[in-house]
């Protein structure tokens, strides 16, 4: 069975999810409430609701019946890789970035990332730290360097989330350059998507289906 990824604007996801506060745990609601920005709170709530909707569709279960928890091996704070209490064998992942959210569920490890495309310039110091020389050259020569860099970033972030590497060693994840679809990378399938406002990627061992909301 193929895995499933869902992504879309925060507003569209909140509209589709209904009463998101009825879906989330007290811990998640407290984390959302601690965020100062209303936009950040909406992104958080939408992403945590979307991962339940995504997993629910994959498993054939109501989103309300699924509990998402996060834990960190380095501290006691409730963050880190998410997991489903009721289906620990199902991998789940979520992401949010300035008005956009994404989630994925699969029968095994899965990682998803999304980034909003804006008019800001590329931070070349960051780009040099996370890209290989070949990738960096491709980003510099692209007509839209910012978008080209974000494409590589979301690919690498999705691989980091499945444990294929770390952001500290992102330049060692030698991915095909922007503009070329990489169906696999060392056994991982990479599924890209993107429009004029956001780009994203999901990484998994299995085939993934993608549905864009809104």
Image (cartoon, rainbow, N blue to C red):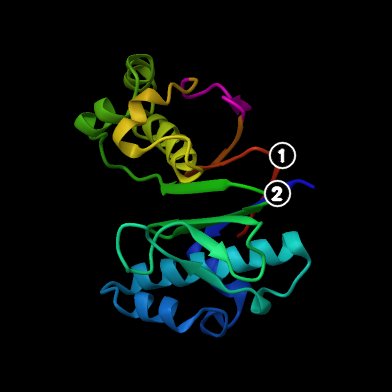
63 left or right of 175? right
Residue drawn at (42%, 60%) of the image:
99
Please identify the dominant SS of the magenta region.
loop
Residue drawn at (37%, 75%) of the image:
32
**Looking at the image, residue 120 lies above or below residue 60:** above
CB contact under 8 Å: marks 1 and 2:
yes
Closer to us: 30 or 144: 30
Q: Which mark is residue 132?
A: none
Q: Give x and y (percent) for residue 5.
A: 63, 51
125 left or right of 115? left
Which region shows up in magenta? 177-187
Residue drawn at (25%, 36%) of the image:
121
**Looking at the image, residue 105 lies above or below residue 62:** above
Q: Is residue 182 magenta?
A: yes
Q: Is residue 11 magenta?
A: no
Q: Secondary structure at mark 2?
A: strand
Instruction: Quadrant for residue 189, please give it.
Output: top right
Q: Give x and y (percent) for residue 137.
A: 33, 15
Residue sitting at the far left: 125
- Whichever of callouts 1 and 2 sits on the residue coming sooner in the sequence is 2
Q: Which mark is residue 3?
A: 2
Q: Secondary structure at mark 1?
A: loop
Residue drawn at (42%, 35%) of the image:
165
Q: Give x and y (percent) for residue 91.
A: 61, 54
| Gap in angstroms between the C-alphas marked 1 and 2 | 6 Å
Q: Which mark is residue 207?
A: 1
Mark 2: give few (<14), some (14-19) or many (20+) Cα within 10 Å: many
Residue 197, can we see it? Answer: no
Residue 16, can we see it? Answer: yes
Instruction: Quadrant for residue 148, please give it.
Output: top left
């Amino acid at each position: 069975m193929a895995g499933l990824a869902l992504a879309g604007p925060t507003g569209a996801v909140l509209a589709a999810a209904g009463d998101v506060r009825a879906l989330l745990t007290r811990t998640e609601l407290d984390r959302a409430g601690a965020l100062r920005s209303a936009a950040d709170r909406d992104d958080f709530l939408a992403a945590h609701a979307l991962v339940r909707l995504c997993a629910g569709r994959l498993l054939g279960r109501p989103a309300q019946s699924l509990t998402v928890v996060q834990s960190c091996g380095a501290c006691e704070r409730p963050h880190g890789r998410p997991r489903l209490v009721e289906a620990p064998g199902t991998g789940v992942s979520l992401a949010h970035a300035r008005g956009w959210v994404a989630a994925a569920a699969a029968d095994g490890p899965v990682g998803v990332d999304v980034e909003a495309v804006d008019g800001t310039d590329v931070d070349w110091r960051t780009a040099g730290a996370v890209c290989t020389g070949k990738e960096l050259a491709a980003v510099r020569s692209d007509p839209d360097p910012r978008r080209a860099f974000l494409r590589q970033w979301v690919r690498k972030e999705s691989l980091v989330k499945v444990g294929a590497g770390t952001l500290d060693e992102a330049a060692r994840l030698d991915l095909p350059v922007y503009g070329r679809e990489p169906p696999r990378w060392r056994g991982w399938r990479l599924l890209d998507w993107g429009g004029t406002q956001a780009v994203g990627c999901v990484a998994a061992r299995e085939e993934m289906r993608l549905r864009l909301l809104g």
